[in-house]
């Protein structure tokens, strides 16, 4: 990585956005031999949505295309962790149910995953509670993927930037695209113009407004998502997997000698923002045992935590960028010279490697539109929110 003080006037490829997706795109672009420039409007890389993520990755998806996307990312994480401390941990993802409908959903999806080559274990409630004794006695089924886990999302982004060999400029914002007819030929920034045959939009929740400046509307919406941080809580079993109740989508995983807690049920769209406000209602919704989506429903030790004088917490908030079909937009847009790498719908960390490699391959013609299920101009049937 080369931080440059002056904006270069030309590049082979300009990436707008220095989060984990922009850094991953830079890595693969430089591997392909492209002179690559990353423009980041903030004072440091990976400081908008990347650090708010919990860093989770899983092969437990409801479609084989995204499974392969994440499978590629996971293999890369293993290699990268030999060279950089990215906090890589394989403690698994455990989905649990407490109702008959939830049990059916959990088991049916597990059998489909097995058909796609995903290594998951299906358990009845008795076995789940025996293997994971912190679970509530009314848990009636579990689905466990031992290869799943998590990492430190900002460390991942900075490792990718360090190995990319790309040029990075900070505190420089893209203000417009340079055009020659229907072709994008570069970027106008607050530090001047840079010309390039290709420009990639990788600005997460800010992608929609930026694309709208050239008349593109891929149907992106942004939704506020919180992360509850509960540090130094001995009640949390530190060897536990990511634990998710399928009925509510409430989930938690160990972190900071305590836990991170989340709830990603459907929420209203909000305008894209760089400073996303937090709400104490989110913390109370997860921590108060009387809440409809309390963590204590599936893991009763959270009830004791709620009453503990040692309990402390704080919140972070960012925005997921959703596409209508909840899959990312990867590759050239309908405007020549302009490509997109965004819209991961909450799966940006786990999809960052497989997605960015595909986006670069599509730009270079190595991946044809017909072979790219994530191409930006694909038909998109609306799909329901994933619980994660």
Image (cartoon, grey):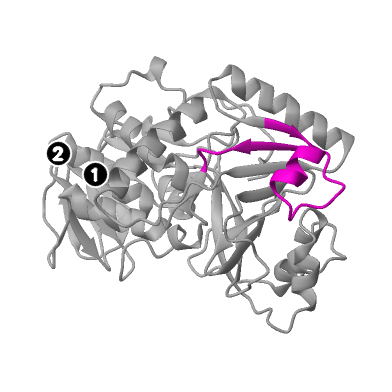
Q: Is residue 360 visible?
A: yes
> Residue at image x 83%, y 39%?
140
Q: Is residue 281 magenta?
A: no
Write down the residue under mark 1. Answer: 27
Identify which residue is drawn at 31% across, 68% down. 44
The reply to whether residue 376 is in sight is: no
Question: Is the C terminus in the top left, top right, bottom left or bottom right quadrant?
Answer: top right
- Callout 1: 10 Å neighbours few (<14), some, many (20+)? many
Looking at the rendered structure, which numbered label has been put on residue 34?
2
Q: Earlier in the sequence, mark 2 or mark 1?
A: 1
Q: Position of residue 363 (x, y in %)?
A: 27, 30
Provide the residue span drawn in magenta. 122-148
**Would you place residue 43 above or below residue 36 in this image?**
below
Dot label at residue 145:
none
Q: At numbered mark 1, what does the secondary structure look like: helix, strand or loop?
A: helix
Residue 219 position in % (x across, y down): 55, 39
User: Residue 248: image x %, image y %?
Assistant: 77, 49
């Amino acid at each position: 990585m080369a931080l440059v003080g002056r904006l270069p006037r030309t590049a082979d490829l300009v990436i707008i956005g220095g989060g984990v997706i922009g850094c991953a795109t830079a890595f693969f672009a430089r591997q392909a031999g492209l002179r690559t420039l990353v423009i980041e409007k903030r004072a440091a890389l990976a400081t908008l949505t990347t650090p708010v993520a919990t860093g989770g990755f899983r092969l437990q998806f409801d479609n084989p295309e995204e499974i392969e996307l994440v499978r590629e990312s996971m293999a890369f994480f293993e290699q990268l962790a030999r060279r950089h401390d990215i906090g890589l941990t394989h403690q698994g993802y455990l989905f649990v149910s407490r109702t008959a409908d939830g049990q059916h959903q959990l088991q049916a999806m597990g059998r489909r995953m097995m058909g796609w080559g995903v290594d998951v274990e299906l358990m009845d409630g008795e076995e789940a509670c025996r293997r994971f004794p912190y679970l509530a006695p009314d848990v009636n089924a579990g689905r466990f993927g031992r290869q799943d886990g998590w990492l430190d999302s900002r460390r991942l982004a900075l490792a990718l930037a360090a190995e990319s060999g790309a040029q990075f400029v900070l505190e420089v914002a893209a203000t417009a695209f340079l055009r020659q007819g229907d072709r994008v030929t570069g970027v106008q920034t607050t530090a001047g113009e840079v010309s390039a045959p290709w420009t990639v939009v990788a600005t997460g929740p800010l992608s929609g407004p930026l694309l709208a400046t050239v008349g593109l509307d891929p149907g992106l919406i942004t939704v506020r998502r919180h992360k509850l941080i509960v540090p130094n809580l001995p009640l949390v079993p530190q060897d536990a997997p990511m634990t998710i109740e399928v009925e509510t989508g409430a989930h938690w995983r160990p972190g900071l000698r305590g836990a991170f807690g989340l709830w990603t049920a459907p929420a209203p769209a909000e305008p894209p923002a760089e400073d996303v406000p937090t709400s104490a209602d989110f913390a109370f919704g997860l921590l108060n045992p009387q809440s409809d989506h309390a963590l204590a429903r599936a893991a009763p030790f959270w009830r004791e935590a709620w009453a503990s004088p040692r309990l402390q917490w704080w919140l972070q908030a960012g925005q997921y960028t959703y596409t209508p079909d909840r899959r990312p937009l990867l590759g050239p847009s309908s405007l020549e010279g302009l490509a997109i790498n965004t819209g991961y719908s909450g799966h940006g960390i786990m999809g960052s490697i497989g997605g960015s490699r595909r986006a670069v391959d599509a730009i270079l013609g190595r991946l044809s539109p017909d072979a790219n299920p994530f191409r930006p101009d694909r038909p998109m049937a609306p799909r329901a929110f994933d619980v994660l």
